[in-house]
Amino acid sequence: MSAPGTPSPSADVVLEVKDLKKHFPIRKGLFSSVVGHVQAVDGVSFSIRRGEALCLVGESGCGKSTVARTIARLEEPTAGSIVLNGTDISALGEGEIRPYRRQMQMIFQDPYSSLNPRLTAGEIVSEPLTNFGLAMGSDLQARVASLFERVGLRADAMAKYPHEFSGGQRQRLGIARALAVSPQLILADEPLSALDVSVQAQVLNLLIDLQDELQLGYLFVSHDLAVVEHIGHRIAVMYLGRIVEIADNASLFDTPLHPYTEALLAAAPVPEVQRTKRERIILTGDVPSPSAPPSGCRFHTRCPYVRPECSRIDPPLVEVAPGHHVACLLRPGPSAGHAAP
Ligand code: SF4
């Protein structure tokens, strides 16, 4: 079976993730015995095609950044497959995965900590080109200069060190470094959240322009619904390590079908995110621990529409309308009709 939201077979799929899991062991005691696991990501499936931005959204701790880091193989997957341009990279060793790292690059939340403070900006962008043997000499200089220009940095910035840049400039530098090896997939982990509000829109528009121009696939992780609405072609909503709803941008923002998505949108402070005037749903209770997720539907401890069976039955992610998948017992699928919450 295809991952939810899988494009038609003719479409150019860059990434297909199936049933991805990342569980972190909890160790205690003198001998660091494993006493449990944090189920940070617990069975996530989706695909991304060329030129498409899939956004992962959800509250802090829902596992969205871990999804991106596991796909980048900065974390070892516990289970599942990560198929990048037709090759499953989930079990490749460090040496084997190296050529695939060129095909996907990561943009991090904190551009400062992701840049080597001892290298000049020019050296930072040159590094991946020389590491992969893609350019040298005058060709290298020309390619770095072109990347600087493309991300809106002046050529004289090449001689500066990261601490001499503003936050927005450092993120532009991070983007230039990611683009240097001509990747097809960008994994962007909250790339705007460390920036001043005044520069967020500029960096967001740069990312959108680059995607359009280079037909990049984006996995864009964010907690900010206004940003997600602006950049996402499709949106996946995560709760406690799982995707609970995935749909195209218009469907998700106009007709959210999962109670958790409804609550997220209703709580959004930005009016344009709330395209439909909806009752404000206040979620009660804390997010349960991912080391001991609730039985049945993981959202049942906070859901305003909870039914007795919700604590027993774990609802699968089902397609209730073309391309619109939801994991909720109130949404049994098109053949069984729609039950309004
Ligand atoms: Fe709420 Fe039940 Fe649907 Fe879970 S399955 S979201 S608890 S109504």
Image (cartoon, grey):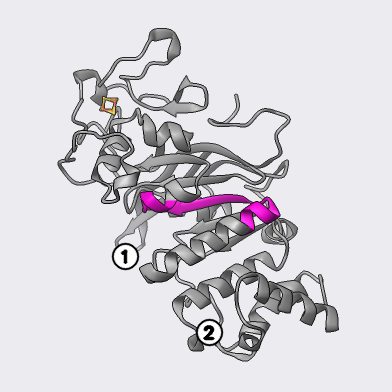
Question: Where is residue 75 shown, x and y percent of the image?
Answer: 52, 57
Q: Which residues are magenta?
A: 210-227
Is 79 left or right of 129, judged from the image as shown? Answer: left
Badge 2 crowding class, 10 Å Cα cut-off, few under 14, some 14 to 19, many 20 or more, is many
Query: Which residue is at a point 38% across and 16% down the rendered structure image?
Result: 332
Q: Which percent across, then down, holds residue 146?
A: 73, 74
Q: Position of residue 320 (x, y in %)?
A: 44, 20
**Residue position marked by numbered label 2 in the rendering:** 162
Query: Which residue is found at the position 60% from the left and 24% from the top?
Result: 1
Ligand 1's quadrant is top left
| Position above or below: 302 against 28 | above
Q: Quadrant of residue 99?
A: bottom right
Nearest to N terminus: mark 2 or mark 1: 1
Mark 1 residue element: loop
Where does the image place residue 58, in percent across and percent down from the top left? 36, 47
Q: Considering depth in this image, is 143 or 177 the residue closer to the camera?
A: 143
Q: Is residue 302 above or below residue 325?
A: below
Residue 164 in sight: yes
The quadrant in which the C terminus is found is top left
**In the image, is residue 1 part of the stretch drawn in magenta?**
no
Secondary element at image label 2:
helix
- In the rendered structure, which amino acid carries the disc numbered 2? Pro
From this view, report whether residue 163 is shown above or below residue 283. below
Q: Mark 1 Cα within 10 Å, few/some/many (few <14, many 20+)?
A: few
Q: Residue at x 72, y 79 (%)?
A: 145
Judging by the rendered image, the residue that carries numbered circle 1 is: 30
